[in-house]
Amino acid sequence: MEYKSTVLRTSAVVRKVISIHYFEYMSNFSFPGESHDFWEFVCVDKGVIDVMAGEKRVPLKRGNIIFHKPGEFHNIITNGEVAPNLVVIGFECHSPCMKAFEGKMLTVSETERELLARIIIEARNAFSGRMDDPYQEELVRQSSPLAFGAEQMIANYLEELIIHLYRRYFENPGQFGPRRQPEVRIKSDAYSRIVRYMEEHIGECLSIDTICHDTLTGRSQLQKIFREAHGCGVIDYFSSMKIETAKQLIRDNHLNFTEISDRLGYTSVHYFSRQFKKLTGMTPSEYATSIRRLSEYSLFGSRSQPEDGVNS
């Protein structure tokens, strides 16, 4: 037999990435806006924002994604109430399919959300520096065993994200449902039920016995579910949920640390502060100051100093 090779056709090709960010911002953050010669998308992971796309103001909520074409003026506006978590990625792609994304606000599926998460993970492997600094102008490569193949994986996942969205919205709408990943299968109905229960009782001190009793789950099954899904025990996961909620409340900027500690069921603000530092590597004050400094960064290159007594 004489075999013949097939040159694979490409539909979406990404050769350059300009920026990869995951932002956690204060509720009053406002980005003055910019335009540039590459594509950029904003995806809301938590909270709500408005964006300007050219002369159009577009509201975005969790799961929404919007693509800004090269040369389009855009900015980000928060509502002063809910602090947003955003994925923002700038990249070069000259494939004809990108024309379809102009002026469109879309919603990511579970599969596409997973691809975004993988891009963030590989970016941490490939590049040094903070991913939450909106004014970082260059991705700096780092030397690490984990960096091998990371940049190629970023391109692959980004291309796959574009293809998934194009298929769902522009080529065969509704035909391509979300493809479940192994990680998603782990998160069964029991997992969803338990997480929902913990979210509803985030202000309490839950024990394993209480969770088992109230969710009708065996102790060994409960621990197995969270070991497989997250590599930790259920109480460790609940503790991390509390701290993530605390971070959100700090960025919302409506409660002081004592009020946040009380709302989340900590025995004292000092214990809350110790737990926060244990899981984040910084105190609540350091976290609030860090986020505020980024939020108040001037376009002209100077950082505004935080007000005394913020959230203290």
Image: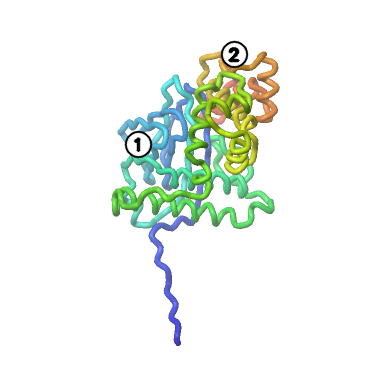
Task: Please identify the quarter of the rendering in which residue 274 is found.
Answer: top right
Please state which amino acid type lies under the numbered disc 1. Answer: Ala
Q: Determine if residue 192 is in view.
A: yes
Q: Position of residue 308 (x, y in %)?
A: 61, 13
Residue 23, x across and y down, in percent:
52, 34
Whether residue 249 is situated above or below residue 152 in the rendered picture: above
> Taking 267 as reference, is 152 left or right?
left
Q: Residues within 10 Å of mark 1 (few under 14, many from 20)?
A: many
Q: Secondary structure at mark 2?
A: helix
Residue 34 in the image: above or below residue 200: below
Q: Is residue 158 left or right of residue 283?
A: left
Between 309 and 7, the one nearer to me in the picture: 7
* Residue 293 in view, yes or no: no
Could you give the CA–CA distance between mark 1 and mark 2, rounded to whole angstroms? 41 Å
Vertical placement of residue 249 versus 95, above or below: above
Q: Residues within 10 Å of mark 2 (few under 14, many from 20)?
A: some
Residue at horizontal 46%, vertical 43%?
113
Q: Give yes or no for contact between labels 1 and 2 (Cβ–Cβ under 8 Å).
A: no
- Asked if 19 appears above or below 285 in the picture, the reply is below
Q: Quadrant of residue 77?
A: top left
Residue 53: mark in rendering? 1
- Which residue is more in the foreground, 215 or 280? 215
- Amino acid residing under circle 2: Asp
Q: Label 2 belongs to which residue?
A: 262
Question: In terms of depth relative to the viewer, which is nearer, 149 or 192?
Answer: 192
Q: Quadrant of the C terminus?
A: top right
Q: Nearer the viewer, residue 88 or 206?
A: 206
Mark closer to the chain start, 1 or 2: 1
